[in-house]
Amino acid sequence: MPKKLPPEYVDMQQQVEAHARRYGLDMFDTYYEVLDFDEINMVASYMGFPVRYPHWKWGMEYERMSKSYEYGLHKIYEMVINNDPCYAYLLESNALVDQKLVMCHVCGHNDFFKNNYAFQHTNRKMIDEMANHATRIRRYIDWFGVDVVESFVDKCLTIDNLIDVDAPYIRRKRQEPDAGEAVQPPDRKRALGLLPTDREYMERYINPDEFVAAQKKKLEEEQQRKKRFPAEPERDVMQFLMENAPLEKWHVDVMDMLREEAYYFAPQGMTKIMNEGWASYWHAKLMTEKVMDSSEVIDFADRNAGVMATSRQSLNPYALGLALYRDIEDRWNKGRFGKEWNECDDMAERRRWDKQTSLGREKIFQVRQIYSDVTFIDEFFTIDFCREHGFFAYEYDKKKKSFVIDTREFQAVKNKILQSLTNFGQPVVAVLDGNHENRGELVLQHSHDGIDLDGQYTHETLRNVHAIWTRPVHLLTRLEQRKVMLSFDGKTLTEKTIS
Amino acid sequence: MSLRIQNDHARFKDIVRGRIKSNLKSYIKKGELIGKQGKDKIMIPVPRIDLPHFRFGDKSQGGVGQGDGQPGDPVHGEPQEGQGQGKAGEQAGEHGLEVDVTLDELADMLGEELALPRIEPKGSELITERIKYTGINTVGPEALKHFKRTYKQALRRQLAMGSYDPKNPRIVPIRDDRRYRTWRVEQKPQANAVIIYMMDVSGSMGEEQKEIVRIESFWLDAWLRRNYDGLESRYIIHDAVAKEVDKDTFFHTRESGGTMISSAYRLCADIIEKDYPVESWNIYPFHFSDGDNWSIDDTRICIGLLRERVLPAANQFGYGQVESPYGSGQFIKDLHEHLGKHEKVVTSEIKDKDAIYPSIKDFLGGGR
C-alpha cells in the first residue's frame, strides 16, 4: 500500500519543516504517506492507524465516511498520529496548496505531541503496539470464534471511558509503610492521634474530652473505610474489573489492550482545543509568512475559512484554540498581564496598554507545554475575550422544545465550557464498592455535577458491566434532582430513589 | 485492490442485515419502505447500532456557541460536535442509521425469514443472445475499425520513429496501427414472468384494505422479481366492470358500485391469451377482494373462467381476501368449495396488517 512520496512533496516537506524549526518548533521525524480517498477513509476509520484489531465499528465508521465523502459532505484533509516517528497522511487528489497547508498543520500537531505534558506518558511506538494488539485479538478470534471475542470486545468498549485519565501523572494510592517498621508497641494515645503531654494535670486541657471523642470517631471511620473494598473509590473501572471480575485469561488480556488504547487516546481528548489551535496557529503563520506563493492565496483563504468557521451550536476547537493563542501572544507582547494589569479599572488606559514586553512567542510556547484544555480555558478565557468573540451559553427550553440562548454572562459561559471539558467531557464514574451488602455486588458512583446521564445509554451500559461482573451491578446517580440507584441483576432493571 | 477494512465493513453490514432481518416483520407491517424506494435501492432506517457508554444526556447538557442573538433566541438545530464545515458528516449516525439495501437483498432476507423455496421457472430453455464488445484487437473486419485507437497508435509510432512533425501534424496509419473492436456473444437463458394484479375497488374496499393490498403486492413483487430477470406487471381494477390501469391508478382509485368478479377474470384471461404465450411465460395472477360478489351466478361464472382459461395458463393463482366491515367474505368459501383441491389455487385471508407476513408465506410458500 505505501506509495513512495513523490519528489516534489519531499522538497515541500523539507522546506516546510525547515521553516518550522526556525520558528522554534521541536518535532519528531515525520513520514508522509499519500493515500487515495478509499484508503484515507479506511485509515481514518481506524483512527489514523494502518492496522487495528478486527471490529465492526471500524466498518460502521468507514461506511459513514465513504457515504459522506460520496455526497460531498466532508473530505479528510489531514491525519496525524502521535508516534515517534510521527506518521501523517495526504489525500492524493488534493491540490498542491492543500498539501502545503496540511504539512504546515502537521508540524504544529507534531510539535504539540512531542512537547505537551499530557502526552509525556503515551507510548511513542503506538503503531507497532496497535499492530500487536490486532495480532493478539486475531489469534483469540481464531481460537474462540469471532462472535465470542467480538461480543466481549463490545462490552469492554462500552466502559473504555471509565478510566482514570489523570492516573499517569500522579500517584493515587498512598505508599504503605514497610510492614517491619510499621509494627510498634501499642500506644493508645498516639493511635488516637492525641497530643503528647508529660503533665497529667494538663491532660484535660490539651486533650479535652470532646477532642478525644472526635478522634475516636475519626479513627473508627478510618477503620471502617479500610475494610471497604476498594478502600478509596476507584476511578479506573476497567482496571478494577480486570483485577477483580471473574474473567478468563484472554478476557483480561483483551481488556488490558483496550484499556491501554483508551489511555493512549485520552490525552488527545484532553487537549483538543489546544492541539488544534496550536496546529492552526502554525499553519496560518507558516503559510502566510513563508511557504505560500501568491497564486495560492485565494485557495488557502478558502480552506482556512472553512476550518475556522464558528457555529451557533458548538465550539469550533480550531477557531477557539487559535484565537486564544493569538490573544495570549498579543497580551504578553504588550505586557497585559500580572497584578498591575489585573487591578487596572480604567478602560481607556487598558486599551492603550502596551509595555513592549515582547514575551508573546515565548509565552505561547510555554503554554503549549504545560497546559491542557481545562487549565488553558480556566487561565486564558478572559472576560474580554469572551465578549469580543460573542460567546453564549444555551439550554434546552422544554416549553419551546428547542435550544435557546440562555445567557451571555461571562462566568456562566466559562463554567459551561469547563464543564464540557472536565474529565475529557465524560461523566466521572468510579467503583464505590465491590462487595455491596457482602453479596459481591458492584456499586458504581456517578459524581453528579449538574448534568443527568442519558437514560437509554446508561441502561445498556449497566447491562454490559453486569455481563463482565456477573453479579448484580448498581449505579448511584441523580435523575431530575432525585438521588437514585439504578440496578441491574441480570434480568430486570430497577430504579430506586434513595434519600 | 482490497482494503483491510473490507472485513470490518462486511462484518458491520452483516450486523445491519441481521437487524433488518429481525425487524422485517415490523417493516412489512408498516409499509414505510415502499415510499423510500429508489431505482433499485431502498433506504431502510435501522435502529441505532452503537456501543453504549455512560454519557451525558443531550437535553440537560446544553452547550456553548458563538454568534448574534439575545437570551431567549433559538439556537436552531441540534447541538453537535462538528467542527466548522469541514466535518459536517461526522454526526450522521447519531439519529439512527439509514442503510441502502438493494431490492434483491431485501427479497433474499424475506426468502430466508419465511423459508421460501426457490422457484423453478418454466421456459428457461429459451435462450437469448447478446453481442458485447469486450476489447481491442489488431485484426478484424473494417466495419469495426476503432478510429481513435488506430490514430493514437499511429501517432505513437510516428513519435517513436521521429517522423512526426508538430508543424505539419499528418498522421498516416499503416497496417500495423489498425485496431479493431472485438466482441463476444453472451448466451443467457431467459425466463419471462408476469404478475397480473386484480383488485376489487367497489365501495366496500376502504383505504386500509387498499393499503394492505399495496404492501402485500410490494413484497410479492420483490420476491418474484428476485426469481425472474424480466418481470412484468399488469394491473386490473374492477367493480361491476373491469379495466386495465397503470400502477398508480391501481392503488389510488376509488370506485363505487357493485362487484362482478367475473369481469376481472375475463379480462385477465384475455390479457394472458393475447400477450403471454403459455409455453414461454410464467404467469402469476393475484386477486384481492373483500369477498363480496354480486350474485351466486357470477361466482359460478368465475369458477368456470378460472378452471377453463386462467388456471391452465398460470403457474399459480393467488386469491387474497382482505377483511372489510362491509364484505360478506363469501367468495373465499366458494373458491374452497369448488377449487379447494386444485393445486394451482392458493388462498389467504388477510385480517389486518399483522396478517400480511403470514399471508406472503401462504402465497409464495409453494415455490411454483
Image: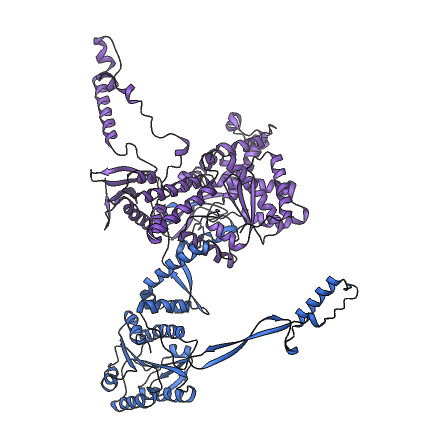
Chain colours: A purple, B blue
Identify the residue shown where x is 56% and y is 48%.
A33
- Whether residue A394 is visible: no
Q: Is residue B18 above or below residue A482?
A: below
Identify the residue shown where x is 46% and y is 43%.
A392
Q: Position of residue A110 (x, y in %)?
A: 54, 39
Q: Position of residue A425 (x, y in %)?
A: 41, 42
Left-right relation of A232 to A336: left
Q: Position of residue B249 (x, y in %)?
A: 41, 79
Which quarter of the rendered picture does the C terminus of chain B lie within?
Answer: bottom left
Left-right relation of A256 to A116: left
Left-right relation of A137 to B331: right
Q: How many marks?
A: 0
Where residue B245 sits, quadrant-wise, is bottom left
Q: Position of residue A148 (x, y in %)?
A: 32, 51
Q: Is residue B20 above or below residue A292?
A: below
Depth check: give the residue in front, B308 or A403. B308
- Whether residue B186 is visible: yes
Depth check: give the residue in front, B77 or B25. B25
Where residue B9 sits, quadrant-wise, is bottom left
Q: Is residue B232 above or below residue A375?
A: below
Extreme-right residue of the structure? B167
